[in-house]
């Protein structure tokens, strides 16, 4: 994390503030709780990475923020604030204005964000004119500028092409152009590089980083790839079974993880710089929503679990500069583990 | 072991390598061309030419007994096609593949073919698609045992299935359940158990962990390692993930647009990659070490395999490309000074051959100022 971003995280008021978010799916056999008491915030210009295994609740959290939670999924409790104002209880039309104008979205499959029947130029100009007061001509000029900015060669010519005429990497660039066309303050990027080859992934990551730096845009970057997080994020939240297990500055979480799940996760990632015979193995699998264990959801897989873990649920507490939800740190608040540095707001 | 069946017409003397180990599998200049033309009528009316796609072109490699050869490359470069050629799911367009000295083409049918099919098995990326959803797991795993008549009597088959399930970390009781009742990682264990049921020596694994979460991937990679050691298996392991290949492979081949551009011992390939594409790939891996190095990702994308660039297919993205590269296809040549025991590096690049690649220790450096971006 750059010193500047670190200071920003500590002093500036949050741009996005999620408090005690709970998302439920009512089913015939009872209510499934998919997201349970998730809280975090993102400062202006900050990149928050969100990692976790599939089903951990990353995408649902993102969808709730942009107001695209699909029924019967619903926000059962909690608050989402953008710049201090609640956005989780807005009517559909009000939320639609915020989406695109103040919050941009990028998804894993660029084709879900692009209409195959319209040229990318008409999709861009329409989105621009929905959110900004511009003439057709000015919007088109801006669209061309945006395409150039995201690295589409000869944008004057490419603007009239259709989505299928672009490669996967190029389409993702177009989606990024769409997401930033109204200068949003926040971008929710859900697995934006997962479907792409490594060389293209590297191009998209450096594009996202450059855009955030140039425009001061905050980003919630959802991915299951810790490498992408390491390269891009200032802070990272590790999700497990619908909750945040650990959250903190990216270097700290990657190199000195506190929560046993994060420790296992980091050790299970193969790397091109080490020569281990075996990877760290977390036995078992993440529980399904209808079978989340009592106490700490990780306890059946945790080598360090003790009695309390099986009965009481741990909440996030300060552990040095990170926050972790684990009974091993129950009294860590300010003691031995803590390093003498200002706590970072989460 | 390699002497078996040496009397067959297709027998080729097994090649002994530097390290002395014998090659179990050898692919010699193999190629696969797909006809992807529009249907004949549309073609005639629209005067479209026949379209041929060269998915694999002049690929040569050997795999020693007990070794893991990794194949990496970006989407569409021909990895899965190589895998399917090696297990005989596709017919070769050109070249030969020998298994234990015997040509697999000649053995594709008949009794000998069945024996061979038992000795090579394949594991796919999507364990769900490759498991029959209406069969119980025990039947799925028992199927190869019955098909190859490896055991007689229900009791013996049962016992073997239980042992196989235990070997891949599942419980005997799991045999009574159906594939959809398992998670992705567990399903991959089931496909491994099924592959092992026919007591193969050689497993072709096409992205076996790519659909899995990292923690589950670690379980499967550890399992594959353990099985290799216990059973002396030989692997062809395909992945687009360089870190996974680095973890599991002894030697690594890098593919680009249907060809192997570099093949070398793992340590050598990762520590001192020579081909500009290998260097670019290694440089593109997100860096967990947080060195904060400013990377200059190489511009451009993989060109369409329908219309590959002439000469070296990598030339539109290569910072070292010159006239010769645009004209002449570079062939795999061993790089002087790199063939240490078992490492034997081979590279297909004019710049490396001419010694004008700078011989920098690692990728990077040349990433800057890449000339031509494909405007496609
Ligand atoms: N049955 C087929 N008919 C026509 N073309 C094919 C067929 N199978 C593969 N191809 C083409 O051959 C090339 C190589 O495909 P292949 O599936 O081997 O790539 P790959 O390296 O496995 O890619 P990925 O990483 O996406 O799995 C691609 O251009 C592909 O479109
Ligand atoms: N429409 C739905 N009905 C029931 N459960 C759902 C629905 N959508 C998502 N879930 C569940 O919510 C959990 C979190 O999902 P998601 O946010 O998509 O995970 P991630 O993005 O981390 O992979 C998962 O257990 C998933 O099965
Ligand atoms: S609370 Fe207990 S079970 Fe949960 S991670 Fe901490 S030690 Fe393990
Ligand atoms: S042959 Fe030429 S274009 Fe191809 S990789 Fe080598 S230097 Fe680059
Ligand atoms: Mg998701
Ligand atoms: Mg493939």
Image (tube, rainbow, N blue to C red):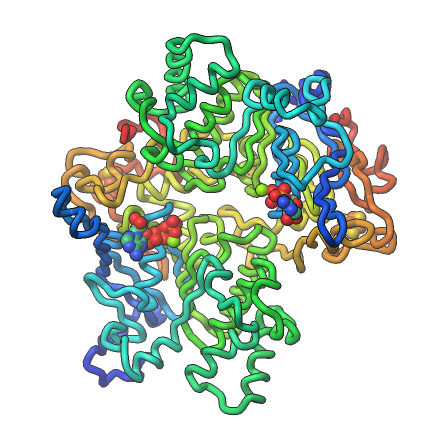
Q: Image quarter for residue A326? A: top right
| B81 and B290: which is toward the camera | B81
In the rendered structure, the answer to whether residue A29 lies left or right of residue B115 reads right
Percent x, y of residue A313: 83, 46
Quarter of the rendered image showing ligand 5: top right
Q: Image quarter for residue B220? A: bottom right
| B51 and A170: which is toward the camera | B51
Q: Is residue A95 visible?
A: yes
In the rendered structure, the answer to whether residue B207 lies left or right of residue B53 reads right
Q: Name which residue lies at 43% across and 40% down.
A: A196
In the rendered structure, the answer to whether residue B182 lies left or right of residue A322 reads left
In the rendered structure, the answer to whether residue A27 lies left or right of residue B46 reads right
Percent x, y of residue A75: 72, 35
Q: Name which residue lies at 23% across and 60% down.
A: B30
Placement of B191 over or under B48, stated as above or below: below
Percent x, y of residue B317: 29, 34
Placement of B327 over or under B127, stated as above or below: above
Q: Name which residue lies at 34% across and 77% down.
A: B116
| B32 and B42: which is toward the camera | B42
| B213 and A332: which is toward the camera | B213
């Amino acid at each position: 994390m750059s010193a500047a971003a670190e200071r920003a995280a500590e002093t500036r008021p949050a741009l996005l503030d999620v408090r005690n978010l709970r998302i439920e799916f009512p089913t015939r056999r009872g209510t499934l709780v998919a997201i349970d008491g998730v809280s975090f915030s993102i400062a202006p210009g900050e990149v928050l990475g969100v990692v976790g295994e599939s089903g951990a609740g990353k995408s649902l959290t993102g969808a709730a923020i942009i107001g695209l939670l699909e029924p019967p999924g619903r926000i059962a409790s909690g608050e989402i604030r953008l710049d201090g104002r609640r956005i989780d209880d807005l009517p559909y039309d009000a939320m639609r204005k915020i989406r695109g104008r103040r919050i941009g979205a990028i998804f894993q499959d660029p084709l879900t964000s692009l209409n195959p029947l319209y040229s990318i130029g008409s999709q861009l100009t329409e989105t621009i004119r929905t959110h900004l007061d511009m003439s057709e001509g000015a919007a088109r000029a801006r669209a061309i500028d945006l395409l150039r900015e995201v690295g589409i060669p000869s944008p004057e010519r490419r603007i009239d092409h259709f989505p299928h005429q672009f490669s996967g990497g190029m389409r993702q660039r177009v989606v990024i152009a769409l997401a930033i066309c109204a200068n949003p303050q926040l971008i929710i990027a859900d697995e934006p590089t997962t479907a792409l080859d490594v060389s293209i992934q590297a191009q998209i990551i450096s594009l996202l980083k450059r855009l955030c730096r140039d425009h001061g845009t905050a980003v919630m970057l959802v991915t299951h790839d810790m490498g992408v997080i390491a390269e891009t994020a200032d802070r990272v939240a590790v999700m497990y079974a619908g909750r945040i297990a650990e959250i903190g500055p990216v270097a700290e979480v990657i190199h000195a993880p506190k929560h046993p799940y994060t420790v296992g996760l980091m050790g299970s990632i193969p790397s091109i710089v080490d020569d281990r015979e075996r990877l760290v193995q977390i036995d078992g699998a993440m529980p399904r929503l209808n079978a989340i264990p009592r106490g700490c959801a990780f306890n059946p897989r945790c080598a360090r679990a003790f009695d309390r873990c099986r009965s009481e649920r741990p909440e996030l507490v300060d552990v040095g500069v990170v926050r972790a939800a684990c009974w091993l740190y129950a009294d860590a608040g300010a003691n031995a583990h803590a390093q003498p540095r200002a706590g970072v707001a989460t | 072991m390699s002497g078996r069946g040496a009397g067959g017409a297709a027998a080729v003397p097994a090649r002994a390598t530097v390290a002395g180990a014998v090659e179990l599998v050898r692919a010699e200049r193999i190629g696969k061309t797909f006809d992807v033309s529009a249907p004949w009528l549309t073609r005639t009316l629209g005067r479209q030419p026949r379209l041929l796609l060269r998915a694999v072109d002049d690929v040569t490699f050997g795999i020693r007994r007990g070794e893991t050869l990794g194949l990496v490359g970006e989407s569409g470069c021909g990895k899965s096609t190589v895998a399917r050629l090696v297990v005989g799911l596709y017919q070769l367009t050109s070249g030969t593949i020998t298994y234990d000295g015997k040509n697999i083409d000649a053995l594709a049918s008949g009794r000998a073919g069945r024996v061979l099919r038992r000795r090579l098995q394949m594991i796919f990326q999507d364990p769900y698609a490759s498991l029959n959803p209406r069969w119980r797991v025990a039947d799925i795993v028992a199927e190869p045992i019955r098909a190859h008549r490896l055991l007689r009597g229900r009791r013996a088959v049962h016992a073997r299935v239980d042992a196989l399930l235990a070997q891949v970390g599942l419980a005997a009781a799991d045999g009574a359940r159906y594939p959809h009742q398992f998670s992705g990682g567990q399903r991959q264990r089931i496909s491994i158990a099924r592959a092992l049921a026919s007591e193969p020596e050689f497993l072709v694994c096409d992205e076996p962990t790519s659909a899995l979460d990292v923690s589950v991937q670690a379980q499967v990679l550890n399992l594959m390692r353990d099985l290799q050691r216990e059973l002396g298996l030989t692997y062809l392991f395909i992945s687009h993930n360089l870190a996974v290949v680095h973890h599991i492979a002894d030697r690594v081949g890098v593919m680009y647009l249907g060809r192997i551009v570099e093949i070398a011992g793992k340590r050598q390939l990762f520590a001192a990659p020579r081909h500009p594409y290998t260097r670019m790939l290694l440089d593109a891996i997100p860096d967990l070490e947080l060195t904060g190095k400013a990377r200059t990702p190489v511009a451009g994308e993989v060109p369409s395999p329908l219309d590959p660039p002439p000469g070296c297919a990598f030339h539109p993205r290569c910072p070292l490309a010159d006239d010769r590269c645009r004209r002449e296809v570079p062939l795999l040549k061993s790089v002087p000074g790199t063939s240490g025991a078992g490492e034997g590096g081979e590279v297909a690049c004019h710049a490396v051959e001419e010694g004008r690649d700078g011989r920098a220790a690692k990728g990077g450096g040349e990433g800057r100022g890449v000339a031509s971006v494909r405007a496609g």
